[in-house]
Image (tube, rainbow, N blue to C red):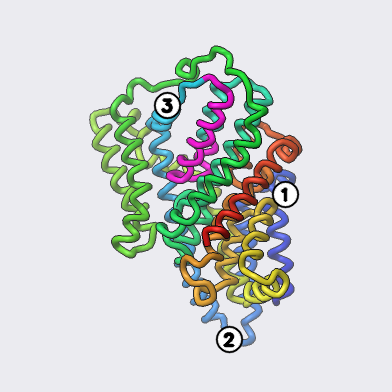
């Protein structure tokens, strides 16, 4: 049974890794892998009569997984509502400079802090769309896009709602919102500042006359409604950690509370419009636009990891890591570098299964360093993070261009950030 589970997991993961080559969505591969693994697990236990206990284990695991999925669905819905109301234009209007160097710093820092409030994937898409509108196609524009990937991943690492992996650790009780923010905001900022300083000498001159306000379409009909939805949306996202601290309820309850608030707000704002116009700005329309395939991908991955956990494979892997690498810092750094090649979601899910809270209590150095390394390590390759894959599709950045021009910058920032985390402890 163990051999079959390992083989199936490796084959499933291989199909996820070569998604674009085989033309099969990674969500399909993840779902099929997760279900087949549970089938093999339960059928292999038929002779021992443990199938009832396996079904109970599946139900228990599904309860934990659903908390992550509901949180992601709620966050995506809020972001889609803001986007439908052109809320992100409030951010883009703040940028006035034409200096290539100054604009690089502004866009990078904006991406850094925006991804902490939203998430790195959404931020990367929004900021890439902005850069494409204001800068002609050129090597400079590609460098900006590369910096957006690095800054979005760095910004998502220090916020409990900025990256899926950090959210998983937060929901699982491995980290607290206050703990992760206080210990990782400086290392994450250094992870961005170092690449910016290194690339700055190559960013010279000014942009051609191309005022940004003429290149961005504005929906003048929204007016005050856009501001209300934008600030309400950002407000409810930032309120989620506060909600968890006050009520001690899981974070997905806070995000669902936020969706309910925004649902009421948008309904009242557009109640006088006709049905066709009203539907564009509704929560129902936002639900239709959220990335459902990503939700199903996470479901499949987490189901797969739960089998490895229940069969004891993750404990064996943990022992192997401990014997080979020696300490938790080396393990966390190693997993972070692996996340540049392997999706960080299953890596973190596996780590949660491998190492218990008894071994590493809440806010232990290991969990904080793991959140940082798996959140920022993916920047080393364009395919190493959801943000990188998204901008690769939007801008047609090649794997080799990013490897030559940006990977060394990302690794320099990664090393500086890891060093800072260790020094802070």
* Residue 189 pos. (x, y %): 52, 45
* Residue 314 pos. (x, y %): 63, 72
Of circles 2 and 3, the one toward us is: 3
Above or below: residue 149 compared with residue 186: above
Residue at the spot 45% in from the left edge and 18% down from the top edge: 213
Seen as rendered, the residue at the extreme bottom is 48
Which quarter of the figure has residue 342?
Answer: bottom right
The earlier-in-sequence mark between 1 and 2 is 1
Give neighbour class at mark 1: few <14, some 14-19, many 20+ (Cα, 10 Å).
Answer: few
Residue at the spot 53% in from the left edge and 14% down from the top edge: 210
Of circles 1 and 3, the one toward us is: 3
The earlier-in-sequence mark between 2 and 3 is 2
Q: Which mark is residue 18?
A: 1
Magenta stretch bounds: 98-125
User: Is residue 146 toward the left or the right of residue 60 in the image?
Assistant: right
Magenta-drawn stretch, dominant element (helix, strand or loop)? helix
In front of the other: 49 or 282 = 282
Labels 2 and 3 touching (C-beta < 8 A): no
In front of the other: 145 or 301 = 145
Magenta segment includes 210:
no
Which quarter of the figure has residue 48?
Answer: bottom right
- What residue would you read off at disc 3? 94
User: Is residue 227 toward the left or the right of residue 425 in the image?
Assistant: left
Q: Which mark is residue 34?
A: none
What element does badge 2 sit on?
loop
Report how many numbered discs are placed on residues in the image: 3
Query: What is the CA distance from the residue labelled 1 to the residue labelled 3?
Result: 40 Å
Q: Which mark is residue 49?
A: 2
In front of the other: 6 or 49 = 6
What element does badge 1 sit on?
loop
């Amino acid at each position: 049974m163990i051999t079959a589970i390992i083989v199936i997991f490796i084959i499933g993961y291989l199909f996820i890794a070569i998604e674009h080559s085989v033309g099969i969505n990674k969500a399909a591969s993840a779902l099929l892998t997760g279900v087949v693994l549970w089938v093999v697990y339960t059928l292999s236990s038929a002779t021992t009569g443990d199938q009832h206990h396996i079904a109970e284990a599946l139900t228990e695991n599904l309860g934990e997984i659903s908390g992550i999925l509901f949180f992601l669905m709620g966050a995506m819905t809020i972001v889609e509502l803001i986007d439908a109301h052109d809320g992100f234009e409030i951010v883009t209007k703040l940028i006035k400079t034409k200096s290539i160097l100054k604009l690089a710093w502004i866009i990078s820092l904006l991406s850094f802090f925006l991804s902490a409030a939203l998430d790195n994937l959404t931020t990367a898409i929004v900021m890439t769309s902005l850069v494409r509108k204001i800068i002609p196609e050129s090597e400079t524009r590609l460098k900006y896009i590369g910096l957006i990937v690095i800054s979005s991943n760095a910004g998502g690492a220090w916020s409990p709602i900025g990256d899926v992996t950090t959210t998983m650790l937060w929901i699982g009780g491995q980290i607290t919102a206050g703990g992760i923010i206080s210990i990782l905001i400086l290392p994450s900022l250094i992870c961005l500042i170092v690449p910016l300083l290194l690339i700055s000498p190559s960013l010279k001159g000014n942009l051609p006359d191309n005022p940004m306000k003429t290149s961005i379409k504005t929906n003048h009909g929204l007016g005050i409604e856009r501001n209300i939805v934008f600030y309400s949306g950002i407000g409810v996202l930032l309120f989620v950690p506060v909600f968890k601290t006050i009520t001690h309820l899981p974070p997905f309850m806070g995000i669902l509370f936020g969706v309910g608030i925004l649902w009421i707000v948008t309904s009242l704002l557009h109640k006088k419009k006709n049905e066709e116009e009203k539907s564009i700005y509704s929560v129902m329309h936002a639900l239709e636009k959220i990335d459902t395939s990503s939700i199903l991908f996470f479901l499949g991955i987490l189901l797969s990891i739960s089998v490895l956990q229940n069969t004891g494979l993750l404990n064996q892997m943990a022992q192997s890591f401990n014997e080979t690498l020696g300490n938790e810092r080396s393990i966390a750094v190693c997993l972070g570098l692996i996340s540049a090649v392997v999706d960080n979601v299953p890596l973190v899910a596996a780590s949660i299964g491998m190492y218990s809270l008894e071994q590493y209590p809440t806010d232990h150095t290991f969990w904080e360093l793991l959140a940082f390394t798996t959140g920022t390590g993916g920047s080393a390759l364009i395919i190493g993070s959801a943000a990188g894959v998204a901008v690769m599709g939007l801008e047609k950045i090649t794997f080799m261009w990013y490897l030559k021009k940006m990977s060394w910058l990302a690794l320099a920032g990664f090393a500086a950030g890891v060093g800072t985390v260790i020094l802070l402890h």
